[in-house]
Image (cartoon, rainbow, N blue to C red):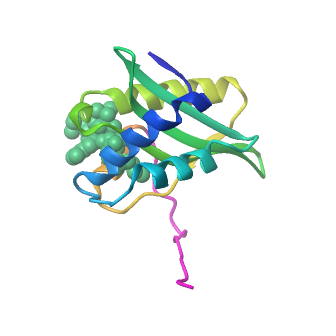
Amino acid sequence: MIRKYRKSDLSSCAAVFCEAFGAEPWYEEWTQELAETRIAELLGTPNSVGYVYVEDGEICGLMAGRRLTYLHGEEYMIDEFCVVPSLQRTGVGGKLMEHACKALEADGVAAIVLNTTKSFPAERFYRKNGFERVHGMIFMRKEL
Ligand SMILES: CC(C)(COP(=O)(O)OP(=O)(O)OC[C@H]1O[C@@H](n2cnc3c(N)ncnc32)[C@H](O)[C@@H]1OP(=O)(O)O)[C@@H](O)C(=O)NCCC(=O)NCCS
């Protein structure tokens, strides 16, 4: 079952997030507390929209994003998207994406945008789901 994120999902979603990004190819050292803080920040704004994939009563996938005003309509920015490693490549992410696309389109959202790491497996997932690289754009960062 796929449904919208609720505040009471925070701890389960953070656990999924830690597991997914702690594994190959990311190996990121998230703690439960840090992940909860990030997800609460992302999904705690008035324009936040999150979706969870629930199987046998357990959350095993999460999409966290925000609807943001842009020139020709609203865009949905995917901030985080993950599936527990044990269920990756079984179609869970694809179903979450399909559900989100349909729900957001029905709600008047014009496009979905995201940043991801070039040549990581996720790039292949997004391309398979109809996303295209935006040429002429680069993602920049300055260490402070
Ligand atoms: C990216 C992610 C959300 C996709 O969800 P999923 O449930 O695995 O995706 P699906 O099963 O619907 O689709 C699988 C397709 O995605 C791509 N893909 C996903 N994971 C892959 C991997 N580890 N290696 C190669 N291709 C992969 C492939 O095209 C694959 O199709 P295939 O199995 O026929 O080759 C999930 O793999 C995940 O959580 N990865 C770790 C976290 C992450 O990278 N998040 C996105 C960061 S921007």
Residue 139 drawn at (x, y percent) = 52, 70
Report whether 45 appears left or right of 128: right
Whether the magenta-drawn stretch holds residue 136 is answered as: yes
Report whether 104 appears left or right of 79: right
| Residue nearest the observer in this picture, 49 or 128 | 49
Residue 87 drawn at (x, y percent) = 25, 31
Judged from the image, the quadrant occupied by ligand 1 is top left
Residue at left offset 26%, top offset 59%: 27
From what the image shows, is residue 109 above or below residue 98? below
Q: Quadrant of residue 15?
A: top left
Residue 80 drawn at (x, y percent) = 48, 47
- State the predominant SS element of the stretch in magenta: loop
Residue at left offset 73%, top offset 41%: 47
Name the quarter where the N terminus is drawn: top left
| Residue nearest the observer in this picture, 75 or 80 | 80
Name the quarter where the C terminus is drawn: bottom right
Whether the magenta-drawn stretch holds residue 113 is answered as: no
How many marks on residues?
Answer: 0
From what the image shows, is residue 134 above or below residue 2? below
Q: Quadrant of residue 82?
A: top left
| Residue nearest the observer in this picture, 101 or 92 | 92
Q: Quadrant of residue 58?
A: top left
- Say whether residue 5 is visible: no
Residue 3 drawn at (x, y percent) = 53, 20
Report whether 134 appears left or right of 30: right
| Residue nearest the observer in this picture, 65 or 106 | 65
- Residue reaching furthest to the front: 33
Residue at left offset 52%, top offset 36%: 10
Residue at left offset 29%, top offset 53%: 22
- Say whether residue 107 is visible: yes
Magenta region? 130-144
